[in-house]
Image (tube, rainbow, N blue to C red):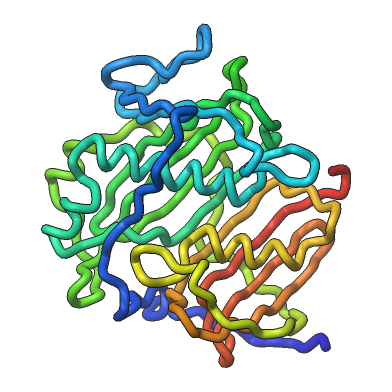
Amino acid sequence: MTKRIEYIKKESSYFNWSQSGNGKKSVRKTVPLTYMIDSRKEKCDFGSIQSYKRCMYSFKSRVRYSECDEKSHMTLSALINYLQDSCTFQSDSLNLGMKYCEDKRAAWVLSYWHIVIERFPKLGEEICISTWAYDFIRFMGYRNFIIKDKDEQVIAYANSLWVYLDTETGKLKRVDEEQKLLYSTEPAYPMEALSRKVEIPSEMEAKEAFKVQRFYIDSNQHVNNEKYILMAMEYLAKNSRINSVRVEYNHAAVLGDMIYPHVGIEDNKVTVLLGNEDMKPFAVMQFLVSKDW
């Protein structure tokens, strides 16, 4: 069934902190194929490849079978997990990780992604993942990511916006000077600047609702950022090649919540709204796709 909707976004609903969240961030354990590199101390090196930014944090890895799709290319889900892990690793290396945030009774919460994929790396391919902060404004932090192959070619890059929250009150909190100093900043990666507000099509098709299961939940006790994208990808055509994705996060879904998907398709643009029964969004995703995959 296709229906016309009117969607009005208010600044007050930009982000609602989940009361069941505890402000923690998750650090995934890695197998020996992954090597951590603090680029202030040594290079991320595949021959001539190196971290060229003073404040960039990098680590290198090799694409695993468990990270690949049916065509032996890395999945978008796996790629996003690498990006998320890289900034967690950087925070840890600067002693600004989970313990620091717990002591501050605060948390960095992802508000917006814009990820562009030039190509998905193949099974066994060596890659280098890098991240750096490029600006801090009041309660917001801006961060870039790049993934390079062994030949120093950038195969994916991303922009992101994070908000700093007080985990006791759920209110926005000004970023302290200590973090600004330790993270420091470098110039932003040269990519298209788009609004953090993902446009909602006027016509969207309602899909079958489903309940949030335990495997969607992370240490914050709500749905992990990457899992919303994984959910939304179910509504892409089978042979779609994802060229980019934008994600706007609004309200954290928790265990047992019902998610009501709505999908809008306009040429090569697929927009997926995952919301509650009243269409108040948990997250809105917009994919640019092609059919030459």
The picture places residue 111, in percent across and down from the top left corner, at: 43, 61
Q: In front here: 110 or 58?
A: 58
* Left or right for 98, reference 244: left
Q: Residue at x 51, y 67 (%)?
A: 215
Location of the C terminus (image quadrant): top right
Rendered residue at 35%/63% (across/down): 219
Provide residue 48's location: percent of width, then percent of height. 51, 8
Residue 203: horizontal and vertical position, in percent?
A: 76, 80
Q: Residue furthest front?
A: 32
Q: Is residue 169 left or right of residue 114?
A: left
Identify the residue at image location x=32%, y=43%.
135
Give the mark count.
Answer: 0
Quarter of image, res 90? top left
Q: Quadrant of residue 179 in the image?
A: top left
**Image height check: is 237 above or below 68?**
below
On the picture, is 173 further left or further right than 285? left
Residue 27 location, x and y as percent?
Answer: 35, 48
Viewer-side residue, 292 vs 114: 292
Write the residue at 19% across / 77% down.
Answer: 169
Q: Quadrant of the N terminus?
A: bottom right
Q: Is residue 41 above or below residue 271?
A: above
Question: What residue occupies the far top of the structure in this picture?
Answer: 47
Along the viewing direction, whichever of 144 and 76 lies nearer the viewer: 76
Vertical relation: 138 (above or below) 209: above
